Image (cartoon, rainbow, N blue to C red):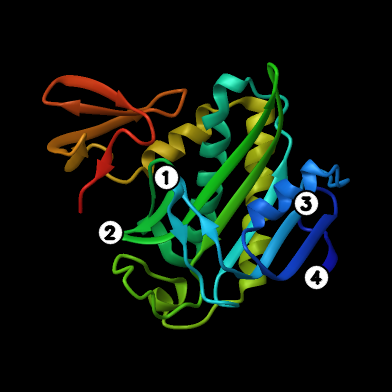
């Protein structure tokens, strides 16, 4: 384990690099549960994360040393607990803006928080919030981005920055650039609210205003994404009928 000053984020908070860990989110949550004195902005990065997770309990498989896998500690006590998805939007937009510098405007957010280019997954996020009573105590923000991995086994819709650029990219450079963007958007969220960030999120939402196929309770239907609610529910239009869905209630069909 290495601990360094991380001057690019939150006034020099720590960057802790672990050679091997099951999950950076689990590691950070475990240390927090034992009252570790981590300040907001602490970053835990893994060289080898062998038990990464995504939404719905999906596994995140990453070759050691090939990809960016890290967790970030935030304490968004300024947000109402009913607006937890606002943080998701701010983080998602940060990833989009960072990757656009490398890959252009093809980068999209597949609701609720996967990063796609075309129909291929480039990365994803898992944000785990701790609520105490009516207050938001802290958030562990886990982010994984495929950087230099060439092969993904059975994951036929996965891709990496290296595959797209035809050259390797320095993982720590991506970390610094991304964390700087997160800090800027996090401070914007605190100062001015979600309006501008949500506008960017919707503009880059995978499937927005496109008729696509979805699965609802095992039934395939055609619908069009038109918005995301303040609670983070996906809102679709089915030929004039609008319906909203939580994370596990609708599945994209490819």
Residue 142 placement, left or right of 213: right
Location of the C terminus (image quadrant): bottom left
Residue 243 makes an appearance in the image: yes
Q: CA distance from mark 4 to mark 3?
A: 14 Å
Label 1, on which residue? 56
User: Residue 71 got which mark?
Assistant: none
The answer to which of marks 4 and 2 sits earlier in the sequence is 4
Tell me the crowding category of disc 3: few under 14, some 14 to 19, or many 20 or more residues within 10 angstroms, Cα based.
many
Location of the N terminus (image quadrant): bottom right
| Viewer-nearest of discs 4 and 2 | 4
Relative image position of residue 188 (x, y in whole percent): 65, 34
Q: Residue at x 17, y 34 (%)?
A: 223
Q: Residue 75 or 199: which is nearer the viewer?
A: 75
Check disc 2 and report its element: helix, strand or loop. Answer: loop
Labels 3 & 1 near each other (Cβ < 8 A)? no
Splitting the image into 4 quarters, where does residue 238 fall? top left
Q: CA distance from mark 1 to mark 4?
A: 30 Å
The answer to which of marks 4 and 3 sits earlier in the sequence is 4
Label 3, on which residue? 42
């Amino acid at each position: 384990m290495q601990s360094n000053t991380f001057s690019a984020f939150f006034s020099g908070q720590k960057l802790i690099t672990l050679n091997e860990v099951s999950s950076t989110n689990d590691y950070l949550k475990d240390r927090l549960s034992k009252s570790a004195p981590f300040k907001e902005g602490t970053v835990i990065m893994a060289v080898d994360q062998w038990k990464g997770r995504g939404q719905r309990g999906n596994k995140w498989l990453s070759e050691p040393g090939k990809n960016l896998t890290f967790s970030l500690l935030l304490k968004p006590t300024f947000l109402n607990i009913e607006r937890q998805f606002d943080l998701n939007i701010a983080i998602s937009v940060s990833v989009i803006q960072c990757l656009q510098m490398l890959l252009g405007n093809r980068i999209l957010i597949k609701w609720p928080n996967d990063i796609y280019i075309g129909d291929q997954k480039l990365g994803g996020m898992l944000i785990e919030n701790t609520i105490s009573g009516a207050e938001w105590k802290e958030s562990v923000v886990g982010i994984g981005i495929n950087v230099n991995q060439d092969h993904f086994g059975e994951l036929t819709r996965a891709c990496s920055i290296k595959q797209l650029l035809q050259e390797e990219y320095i993982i720590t450079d991506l970390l610094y650039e991304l964390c700087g963007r997160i800090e800027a958007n996090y401070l914007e969220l605190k100062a001015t609210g979600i309006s501008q960030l949500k506008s960017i999120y919707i503009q880059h939402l995978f499937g927005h205003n496109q008729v696509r196929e979805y699965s609802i309770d095992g039934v395939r239907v055609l619908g069009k994404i038109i918005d995301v609610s303040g609670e983070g529910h996906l809102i679709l239009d089915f030929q004039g009928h609008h319906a909203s869905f939580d994370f596990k209630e609708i599945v994209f069909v490819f």
